[in-house]
Amino acid sequence: MPHGTAPLETGEARDAPRDDLSSEVTPGAGAVAASAEELGRPATIRDVAALARVSHQTVHRYLQGYEGIRPATRERVVEALEALEYRPNLTARSLTTGRSMRIGALTHELDQFGPSKIIQGAAQAARDAGYVLDILSLDMGDPEEIDQALQTVTQHDLAGVLALASTDHMAQAFGAANFRVPAFLAGEEDEFASHHPSQLTTVGFPALIDHLAELGHQRLLHVAGPTAWSAARNRARAFETAVAAHGLVSMGVVHGDWTARSGYEAISALPARLDFTAVVVANDQMALGALLALRERGVRVPEDVSITGVDDIPDAAYFSPPLTTLRVDFVAQGRRAVEHLLARIAQREPADDEALISQLVVRRSTGPAAP
């Protein structure tokens, strides 16, 4: 090592704060801008570097996902990026690196709460990593459209493909596709086949059924989602398992299609005499329809029958009565799907998955079981 040269941390040359920042300031920029409004133009990497008091190479390394940056340095870079509202020039980056900064996302049923929040989380994670998420929503009932979409996505210049599959048919179509770029098939596993129960199954449903048991409920009905959805099958099995574990009685399973209409029709079609004291519905939207059907039958909630949902959609707190439900973090699912895809693009192992947390939210739709 030459005399007088201090050792540097790997990948962090010139990260330490310096008194002389003249080499970091964009020529002609004058004083260092502290905000996007003060800068008066789109921020560059050098603007961010000047505000963060680091080299522009450090900012570049951070944007590329390099993890060997000191925490204090990383924090300054993040704060500068936010203050200057920095947006990467994806076209320039693609020309420089010779690779695309776009991810294709194949999804469906975006009118449903879960898929829409998953794609929201995926878009956020892609944006945070400097990518753009191109979303293509498919009609599950049209095999020809699915084939055309798969052909279209393989013809575009993409860094990778995120295939968000919720149904058996979509999973099969995506699994058989040749995407020609790194791809990640993100969908809820059928827990019976995978033998990997989710936290919703091991913690969420047991907590929900325990809540109903403490209120004195012994006979429970389940309104499930469509059988072609692995999530619906998982929730139905989780219901049956938790009911049996608590020594309660399952009064059976009726099916809907995730919509409020189907929840209404499922309850309306039941015999005149209702033998259950609580209804566990597989999602909040079907629970909304079930609430109306019970009301029209002269059944009071929760005085006569308690009702619960799953998902905790924003409107659930404003149902009549407000709905007891299991909150599910779909945004986190979307973010993790993108993280897995980015790991494949970078040819590295993804970070270990943390358990997706479901949380029991108790509101006024559940009460003591009627005598």
Image: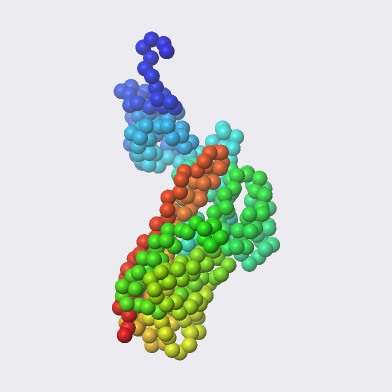
Residue 38, how many percent across, how many down?
34, 38
Which residue is nearer to you in this view: 200 or 321? 200
Left or right of residue 30, residue 63 in this image: right
Residue at 42% in and 85% down: 275
Q: Choose top left, top right, bottom left or bottom right for residue 42.
A: top left
Report x, y in % for residue 230.
54, 64
The quadrant of the picture occupied by the C terminus is bottom left
The image quadrant where one finds the N terminus is top left
Q: Residue reaching furthest top?
A: 3
Look at 42% across and 61% down and name the residue there: 202
Is 188 left or right of 306, judged from the image as shown?
right
The residue located at (53%, 39%) in the rendering is 348
Residues 241 and 345: in front is 241
The reply to whether residue 350 is visible in this rendering is yes
- Tell me which residue sits at (38%, 71%) in the image: 246
Residue 172 rendering spot, x and y as whole percentages: 63, 59
Residue 324 placement (x, y as % from top left) = 35, 70
Q: Is residue 317 in view from this perspective?
A: no
